[in-house]
Image (cartoon, rainbow, N blue to C red):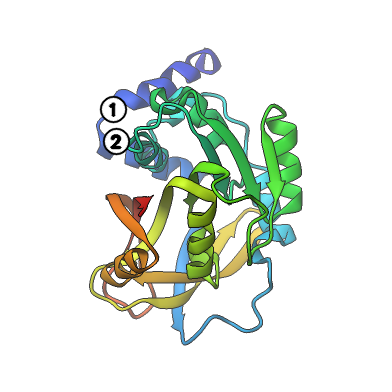
Amino acid sequence: MSAILRPTKRAARRFLPRHLRVLISRVQHARNRTTQAYGRIVPEWPTDAPDDPWADTVTTQRFVETPALDDVVGDLASPVVADNLEACRRTGLGTARLLDLGCATGDYCAYLRHFPGTRAWDYVGADINVAVIAHCRQRYPDFQFDVVSPEGQLPYADDEFDVAFVSGTLQYTNDWQGRLKDLKRIARRSVVLGRLPLWRRHPSAIALQIVQHSGGEEQHPVHLWNRAALESTLRDLGFGIEFCKPGFERLRVVDVAEQVVYHTYLLRRA
C-alpha cells in the first residue's frame, strides 16, 4: 500500500508551506547520507587542485548512483528547483534554447518539460565529467548532452542559446569571471545563476568544501563571494540584475561567524 501511495504523497509536497518543504528536503538529504561543510579559508586557489576535481571516481559515483526521478511534478516544489525555475520563468520567454552547464544528473531536462513557464524550451546539458554525461545520455536519450572543459571557452557559437543556466557550478571554477564572459557570449538573452554562496558582510574568499557520502569523501576548492562585490563585478561584466533571491541553504565556514547563504540570480545581457 505504501508503494502505491508514495507518488501521491510526493506530489502533495507542492501544496505544503515553504518551511515544511524545506524540512522534507533536509530529511531526504540526510537519508541520502550526503553532508556538506566548509573548512577553513585558504589564501588562494590551490595550485595542486586538479583540472577536473568533479570528475574523480568518488564524485562520479555520487552522481551516477542518484536514483532516477519517480515524481517530477512533486520535485518541482523542492526549494532549490523552485527558485531556479522561477528565475527561468522571469525571463518571459515562451520558447527558448537553454544550456545547463554543470548538468550533473541532467534532471533539469525533465523539470523544464513539466514546469508551466518552460514546457516549450529546448534543453542541452553539459558537464566536465565524461562518465556522468554518458549516464545522462542513457537516462534521457531524447536530449543532447555534451562534455566540456572545466576552463576556457565553451564549444558553442555566439548567441547559440537564449538562456545559460548554471546552478551550483560557478563557485567551483577558478576563472569564474572568464566563465561568465563566455556565458554572456553564448547566451543572447539571460544567464541564470543558481546556488551561489554569498556573504553580506564578510569579504569574498576561497575555502575548501568537504562532501561526505556513502561512497567516500570529496574536497573541492570553492569561491565564496561578498554579495556587494559580486554584484559590482556582474555589472562590470555587462550584466543587468533582474532577479535575486536568497535560498534556504546555509552553511558555516570554520572561524567565520556569518553564515554563507545560497542565492539565485537572473542576469540579463546588457
- SS at badge 2: helix
Horizontal side of 19 relative to 216 (left or right) equals left
Residue at 58% x, 82% y: name it.
Answer: 46
Coordinates of residue 162 in the picture (x, y in percent): 49, 41
Against 170, is 29 above or below? above
Residue at 44% x, 28% y: name it.
Answer: 118
Against 21, is 253 above or below? below
- In the image as oriented, which residue stretches furthest toward the bottom? 43
Q: Which mark is residue 220?
A: none
* The one of 222 and 61 positioned closer to us in this rendering: 222
Residue type at numbered disc 2: Leu
For residue 30, say whether it is visible: no
- SS at badge 1: loop
Residue at 73% x, 36% y: name it.
Answer: 137
Q: How many marks?
A: 2
- Label 1 crowd (10 A; few <14 / some 14-19 / many >=20): few
What residue did someone put label 2 on?
20
Horizontal side of 235 relative to 135 (left or right) equals left
Horizontal side of 73 relative to 59 (left or right) equals left
Coordinates of residue 176 in the picture (x, y in percent): 50, 68
What residue did someone put label 1 on?
16
